[in-house]
Image: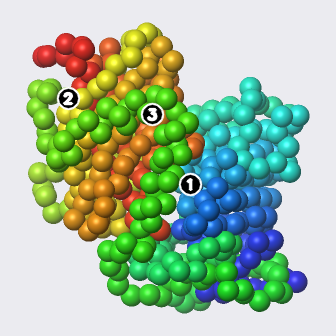
Amino acid sequence: MTTDVTRGDTIFEGDAFSTGPDGHVHLLMHDKGFFSLRPNSRMRIERYSYDSANLSQNRVKIQLETGVLRSITGRAGEMNKRQYRLNTPVAAIGVRGTDYSVYASEALSRISVRSGGVVMSPFGDGCQVAGSGPCDGVAAAELLAVDLGAVLETRVGESTVIKYDTLSPDDLNPPLPEERHLLRQVGDNLSSQETKHDNKAPASTLDNPDESSEKVEGEGKAEVSNESPTEQEARAGLSGGGTHYPNDEQIDFDGRREELSAYVSERPLVQLVVEAGLKGDGLPLPKDAGLVEKPSIIWGRWAEYSGDDESYKTIARLLYENRRYAALNSVFGMLEERVDDRDIPSTGRTFFRLNGYEAYVKRSDRLEGAVLSNASLLIDFEQARFATHVNFDAESLSETSSIVGSGDVRSTGFFSSDSGAPAVINGVFSPGAGEAGYLFQYNLAPGVDAVGATHWVNTSVDISR
């Protein structure tokens, strides 16, 4: 059946949504996933299974039939990226812990990325509509948030390409001004929810942009199932007040350790970097070790996180100093001096030493200071791979968390974590690889992330100046 949807409605696998010329529908998933369906658009939730006790069983499959959809990957997709898929009529989309917008029509798909990265592949012999997870192959292409102004585009019968100077999905169908505020509200309330019912919950709630839907003209409709909510179906309300730091029941430290152990055991390069890191004394590292007089890679926080320190340089101020973006996440923008050629090595394996950092526990738009210890970064230039490990501590956390990730090093001098890595990491080398910097973001619990910016020095290279 078809029915109008209202704020707070619970939805199920199999439900479909459509919007009119002025309609917007916001879906908050139980695992902190978020969808914003723009006007004149249609989507269907084919599969949304989240089991916090068995993350390998998480499954997400969304169909965008037409229009524009913004998607923020939730816990289910973050922890099992090989089973996350968004289909359009012409292509399959997979993610790397991502906030992205996608436009779909019968002949075209186009994606822009705010954070993380996506991979898109046209349907064909190696990529079937009925499949799950991302598709690989020569026709696929990847887009990272650091590729500013770029979009991925797939047309019927053609390979996926990166394009510049073309309209993004948000240009074609913009969000409501209230969307940013809503996302903050979502984070606030998720961090104050109990999670005792979050096993195998495909459920979600609906939200209008304002408390009163009368402020937004247009329509949102859904084809919904007639089944009643079950004990396994959890509902994340949006009307709770106040927030608090998570307790041990909300942050599953044992589960995180198990995930980390499984990840490390299958990757020799990661094993080396973890072993090197754990040789440290466990004491907090200085936030500026002074190994470089003038680092060529720096960072700033977005204006909303700049705080009351007038001396702190926001990203906007740093961009005026002849720098450009190198990496982005939800709190930081990493910038580098403008260079024409990085000329990074193609042979050898090198450890880098942590020179400086800035780290926080992020709860919605609030930051709590954190410290790092036992840090190591290993680059295998011959294999074009990296691995890193740092320990992360904050006053509100009862246990130490390990930030671990590995991924590819590109010939352009950028590096980023694989889709299955525990932490989302994006970084860059200075020319000659004398320095490196990366941003990390690691989900601790629904609404709670470890975030940081780091600067490293290659001790085998003379970078004195």
| Image spot of residue 344 (x, y percent) | 39, 14
Determine whether, in the image, residue 77 is placed left or right of residue 251. Answer: right
Q: Residue at x 57, y 67 (%)?
A: 52
Decide: few, some or many residues near mark 3? Use Cα within 10 Å; few <14, some 14-19, many ≥20: many
Closer to the N terminus: mark 2 or mark 1? 1
Kindly report the distance in space between the C-alpha atoms of the residues bearing marks 3 and 1.
19 Å
Q: Which mark is residue 295?
A: 2
Determine whether, in the image, residue 321 is placed left or right of residue 290. Answer: right
Tag nearer the camera, 3 or 1: 3
Tag nearer the camera, 2 or 1: 1
Kindly report the distance in space between the C-alpha atoms of the residues bearing marks 2 and 1.
32 Å
**Which amino acid, mark 3?**
Val
Decide: few, some or many residues near mark 1? Use Cα within 10 Å; few <14, some 14-19, many ≥20: many
Q: Residue at x 24, y 26 (%)?
A: 457
**Which amino acid, mark 1?**
Glu
**Residues tagged 3 and 1 counted as in contact (Cβ below 8 A):** no
Q: Compared to 343, does 403 lie above or below?
A: below
Closer to the N terminus: mark 3 or mark 2? 3
Decide if residue 445 is in sight here.
Answer: no
Residue bearing mark 3: 270
**Residues tagged 2 and 1 counted as in contact (Cβ below 8 A):** no
Decide if residue 142 is in sight here.
Answer: yes
| Image spot of residue 289 (x, y percent) | 13, 35
Residue bearing mark 1: 78
